[in-house]
Image: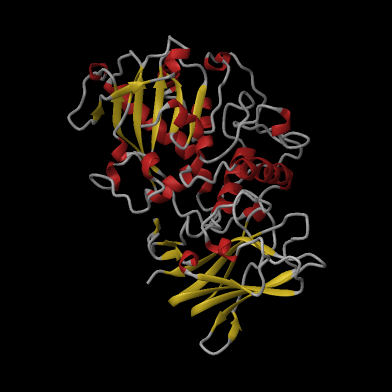
Amino acid sequence: MLNRKGMMMASFSVVIASSLLMGNASFVSADSHLNGDSVVAATGDSTLADMPAYLKSSVEWVWKNRMLTEGSTARKNTIFDQIFAGKGTLNYVIRWQSSKPVTLKQRQDIAKMIDRQMNHWTDHLQGYDGWPYKNIKVKVVGWAVADPSLLLDKQPDEVVYTDTITDTLASEKPEIPAALPVAPNEISRFEHFSDPNYSYPGGLDKRFDMYLWATENFDGGAGGDWGQRMNDEYVLSTVNSDEIEITEHEIGHGFGLNDFYEEHERPPGGFPTNTIMWAGNSDHITDWDIWMLRYTWSQLKKDTSRFPITTKDDDGPIETDPDKIVNIAPAATASSSYTSSWENVSALNDGFEPSNSNDRSHAVYGNWPEIGTQWVQYDFDQEYTVSQTDVYWFQDGAGIDVPKSYKIKYWNGRSWSNVKQANGLGTSADQYNTTTFTPVKTTKLRIEMVSKGSASTGILEWKVAANKL
């Protein structure tokens, strides 16, 4: 089960001064910015092109210089991932590390509060850039409490877990209860998200994605893909509030959004509007936060093996079918026109997720000192229907650069042909470049790259989306 060391390794946490817990902080309106623009609700075809100009540079700076560099979305257990895995649902266990009794009404209000705070974030994704869900169904599936008698008027359908471990924080702060209640590892997504074949006892509905962790005498808050932790009194005193500052802030970390403690962690020139992710800067989600969330989704969705292509029902509800589209690159044999002797063509499809285009922490493919047209190729042991590729270019500033241009070709059984209606063919650094095209049936796929000037070309990862047979 998650201990403190594990929690900190897997989280993006923040401690907010106790004055904020007592409501003594003052805030500047987050809706005041230089040119008076404001965020409008997304429509079915809204994309990054609709981002207000005054937000663009700061949002892009944070993505490139904080989120990519720090890998805050690299773990495939962000709230985006959890919602997709749960088919539009999120399940919580309430971790009640407190000696305070909780009435039935308070427990019901806590469940409503979590649903409300989560949807304050996800409401801004509805109708935006292929986001496939409307209201996210957030459910409390259990309470973990050392003393079950604290749950007053317990109902027959309420699930209660009473196992405990020792909270190591109590050795540093004796006022923190040493007994830390836990729910079973077997139903925790946090413990099993990396295993795509894991089966939860009792089915998917019985799993829990995160904890809402209320701790007696805890200062501030912490959050990550494991859940949100805060003071027990804060939870009870804010449970019926509309927007709850610390709770929403910590949920933001679950989406991969960062803190901004130090000046060097903030965009040059600062933020064009306030942000709830800078502790004490705003008491509610702002325009900047909304577009940072949307921008993050637009980047992550390019990985179609992580976030499969979605479909919409005729009568309105939107669902995903992750079994229909897969990344078939790992099944391919990779080859190239030329590979530098110190590089490795197998890096193309080894499943490594780069943090930036000069990520040398893993094997890479490069063809230095060759220039002009070079190619990389995948050979499959069966025919697939292929419709999309995602390329993460290698750029080291020392002879390897993104290409000037490139083509995607498929083997038609007799010769190489260009794919039709190719849309994308991007050459941006520090991200996957997605290209979609008319589906083709093939056993081989190739990228032909034209180098830029005297620089050679390279690739960190090349994914291929295909229909699963």
* Residue 415, image x, y percentages: 57, 88
Give the color scheme: rainbow, by chain, secondary structure or one colour: secondary structure
Residue 245 percent across, percent down from the top left: 53, 26
- Residue 384: in sight, yes or no? no
Q: Nearer the viewer, residue 170 or 143?
A: 170
Q: Say which quadrant the N terminus sits in.
A: top left
Q: Of all residues shown, which one is farthest toward the top?
A: 175
Residue found at x 20% / y 33%:
157
Outermost residue to the bottom? 414
Q: Nearer the viewer, residue 194 or 143?
A: 194
Is 354 rendered above or below residue 450?
A: above
Percent of width and height locating residue 152: 24, 18
Q: Residue 457: x, y in percent?
A: 71, 65
457, above or below 130, in the image: below
The residue drawn where x is 71% and y is 41% is: 58
Q: In the rendered view, would you say 222 is above or below 64? A: above
User: Would residue 316 be found to the left or right of residue 431 on screen?
Assistant: left
- Res. 229 in view: yes
